[in-house]
Image: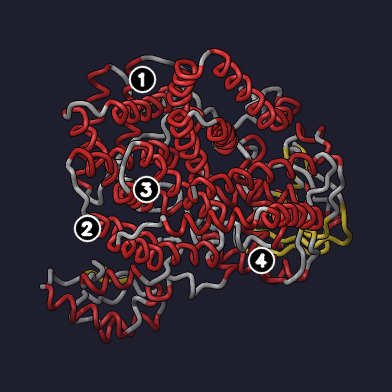
């Protein structure tokens, strides 16, 4: 019951956040004062309810405490994982600011614009995905920013999604009859999923979406088993919220929804099945209605811009259907989780997938079915990561499961999970970054692996958790975008890694290299880089590493942690090349107005500039697009004047072409960026 209560709380907070956002948006009243008023009221009501039922609640708590696990090895594993992995991940989520591409260009940029407008209506933008992509996760992020006045806790939405997913996957394992140890194995498997660990400290949306998906499954299976209407409604609410967070959740959920519907019809009768279907339709209309209304009112379509319009940006659904195309995309999506840091092996996988496409008579890259060119590439970062080990374990577990007699309920679980994966591959074009959208499939796979381990192999030992903890530790402590420890430096030191060549950055470093490293590197005058003289033994490499370390060659690797960077600089952790230009522009932005017009040539977001600037100047900063397609002029938010005294641009020629000279006080180029101080504030916009 404690786990159910935790998930009920997550769903209730989500529903309340949705209600606050949509209702207050109607009155342009999304603001800190209304947020504090709303949540204080909710807190008071909940406290009064708890006080009235304090005796019942206290007795239930004591019952649950008594029934907590007494399995000492299991408890030790739980404590170890919590202290050394979950808590550091929590620290990382709070300390490290959001820094990945999608967060800056639309997840958080849309939140910033909503806060400035006081509503979630559409607004003028250069990055149209800010308007029509699903919004539930951003509603939750916006609530944290309204209550705290910063994005300090924005990453906790995804972290909470991770915790919810871990609780829900353990409940799903329980419905299949797994013991507490089996449930723990499923939980550790999901926790150690590489893409999940990367996502847990970002403002992406996929872990939250996976949480709703797992709540849908856990409550759905429990409702069918216990004929419980409360669980059934929780199941339906979770499905609606999951779809409102990410459309792909609806694809992965569809086979399970059909199964649940059939079971309700078979066990509870036609009347209950009809009521459930009607209730789910009402939930979806209430959830999606306002958002679809905004889309249809502006784009003429509930999902986004129509093909052929000037603001049309992307087409993710496939253009053609066939069995061969479905198999091709399914193979490519699987290939994303077969990569290893072995180039020869990856080329072999490429050849296999290419051969399969040749045998089916289809192209490996076809614009009708693919958004990106396929290649097997091992990568570990917040936007994409290969879940290779988990995928291979799933393949092995499924092979064993289907050889073993019986276990039809678990086989059905996998079959429905696979059907969702195939449906995803059938309807959506292949994209290289899709590894994170596959999380629902892997969540189901984790339960399958745990079931095979405990029921088929009859194993109760917990030692495999050590391996998964080690796998998780690599990501928790060594996330390339925000390291807790200098893992890159430590790995090089342990392996005695020495560079194939060294390139001096200036004359002083050139002199140091010549005096210290000449015995090991071919230091010649006039060369920009110096190559190793020969292949060295392990002992010699350690000596060379020590020499390089003594001249501070590995300084960047040593300080590449979240503790060494300032928060403004950390916003650029995943696109560091942008920071030097921003640093050059910063003095001019400090001198200018705190209301800044963003005049971009590129179709980009500007959240990283806003957030880093807000940290630096210590006063409220407002930014808004002042150049955008003319189609946006009809929007009510476009009719509201935004007066600005400073312009931030990415193109000097564009500034000189568009901004009237009589408005300009001074122009300050800063690399790729340009800061323009105006003689007086203006509300002028530049449409095209």
Considering the numbered disc 2 on the image, is that residue within a helix, a strand or a loop? Answer: loop
Can residue 591 be spotted in the picture?
yes
Quadrant of the rendered structure where residue 387 is? top left
Q: Which residue is mark 1?
A: 325
Q: Which residue is mark 4?
A: 585
User: Which label number is shown at residue 463?
Assistant: 2
Distance from disc 1 to disc 2, alpha carbons, whole Å, reads 42 Å
Q: Position of residue 61 (x, y in %)?
A: 52, 57
Q: Nearer the viewer, residue 74 or 39?
A: 74
Decide which of tag 4 and tag 1 comes sooner along the chain. Answer: 1
Q: Which residue is mark 3?
A: 190
Decide which of tag 1 and tag 3 comes sooner along the chain. Answer: 3
Considering the numbered disc 4 on the image, is that residue within a helix, a strand or a loop? Answer: helix
In the depicted structure, whether residue 494 falls above or below residue 575: below
**Eye-nearest disc, 3 or 4:** 3
**Eye-nearest disc, 4 or 2:** 2
**Eye-nearest disc, 2 or 3:** 2
Distance from disc 2 to disc 3, alpha carbons, whole Å, reads 16 Å
């Amino acid at each position: 019951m404690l786990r159910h209560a935790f998930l009920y709380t997550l769903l209730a907070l989500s529903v309340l956040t949705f209600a606050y956002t949509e209702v207050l948006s109607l009155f342009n009243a999304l603001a800190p004062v209304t947020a504090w008023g709303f949540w204080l009221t909710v807190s008071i009501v909940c406290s009064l309810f708890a006080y009235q039922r304090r005796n019942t609640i206290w007795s239930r708590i004591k019952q649950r405490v008594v029934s907590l696990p007494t399995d000492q090895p299991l408890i030790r594993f739980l404590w170890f994982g919590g202290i050394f992995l979950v808590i550091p991940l929590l620290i990382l989520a709070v300390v490290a600011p959001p820094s990945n591409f999608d967060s800056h260009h639309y997840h958080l940029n849309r939140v910033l614009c909503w806060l400035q407008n006081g509503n979630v209506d559409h607004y003028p933008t250069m990055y149209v995905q800010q308007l029509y992509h699903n919004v539930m996760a951003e509603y939750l992020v916006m609530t944290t920013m309204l209550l705290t006045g910063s994005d300090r806790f924005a990453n906790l939405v995804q972290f909470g999604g991770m915790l919810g997913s871990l609780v829900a996957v353990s409940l799903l394992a329980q419905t299949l009859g797994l013991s507490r140890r089996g449930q723990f194995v499923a939980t550790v498997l999901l926790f150690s999923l590489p893409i999940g660990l990367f996502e847990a400290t970002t403002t992406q949306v996929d872990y939250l979406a996976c949480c709703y998906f797992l709540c849908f499954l856990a409550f759905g299976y429990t409702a069918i088993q216990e004929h419980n209407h409360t669980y059934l409604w929780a199941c339906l609410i979770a499905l609606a919220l999951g779809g409102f967070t990410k459309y792909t959740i609806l694809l992965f959920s569809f086979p399970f929804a059909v199964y649940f519907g059939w079971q309700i019809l078979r066990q509870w009768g036609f009347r209950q099945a009809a009521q459930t279907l009607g209730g789910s339709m009402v939930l979806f209309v209430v959830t999606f209605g306002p958002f679809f209304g905004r889309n249809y009112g502006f784009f003429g379509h509930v999902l986004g811009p129509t093909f052929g319009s000037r603001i049309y940006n992307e087409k993710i659904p496939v253009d053609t259907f066939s069995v061969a195309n479905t198999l091709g995309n399914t193979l490519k999506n699987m290939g994303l989780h077969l990569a290893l840091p072995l180039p020869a092996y990856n080329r072999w996988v490429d050849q296999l997938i290419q051969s399969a496409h040749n045998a089916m008579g289809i192209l490996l890259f076809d614009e009708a079915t693919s958004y990106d060119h396929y290649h097997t590439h091992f990568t570990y970062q917040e936007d994409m990561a290969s879940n290779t080990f988990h995928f291979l374990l799933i393949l092995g577990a499924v092979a064993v499961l289907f050889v073993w007699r019986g276990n039809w309920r678990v086989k059905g679980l996998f079959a429905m999970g696979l059907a969702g994966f195939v449906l995803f591959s059938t309807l959506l074009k292949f994209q290289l970054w899709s590894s994170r959208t596959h999380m629902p499939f892997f969540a189901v796979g984790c339960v399958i692996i745990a079931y095979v381990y405990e029921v088929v192999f009859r194993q109760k030992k917990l030692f495999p958790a050590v391996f998964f903890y080690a796998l998780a530790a690599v990501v928790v402590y060594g996330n390339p975008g925000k390291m807790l420890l200098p893992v890159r430096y430590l790995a090089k030191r342990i392996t005695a890694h020495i560079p194939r060549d060294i390139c001096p950055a200036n004359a002083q470093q050139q002199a140091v290299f010549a005096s210290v490293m000449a015995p090991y590197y071919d230091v010649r005058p006039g060369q920009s880089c110096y190559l190793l003289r020969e292949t060295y033994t392990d002992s010699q490499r350690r000596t060379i590493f020590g020499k390089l370390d003594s001249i501070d060659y590995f300084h960047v690797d040593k300080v590449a942690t979240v503790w060494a960077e300032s928060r403004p600089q950390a916003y650029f952790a995943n696109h560091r090349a942008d920071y030097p230009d921003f640093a050059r522009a910063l003095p001019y932005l400090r001198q200018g107005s705190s209301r800044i017009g963003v005049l971009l040539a590129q179709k980009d977001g500007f959240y990283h500039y806003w957030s880093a600037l807000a940290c630096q100047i210590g006063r409220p900063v407002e930014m808004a697009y002042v150049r955008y397609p003319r189609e946006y002029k009809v929007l009510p938010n476009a009719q509201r004047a935004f007066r600005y005294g400073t312009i931030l641009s990415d193109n000097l020629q564009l500034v000189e072409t568009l901004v009237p000279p009589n408005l300009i006080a001074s122009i300050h180029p800063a690399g790729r960026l340009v800061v323009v101080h105006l003689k007086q504030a203006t509300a002028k916009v530049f449409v095209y």
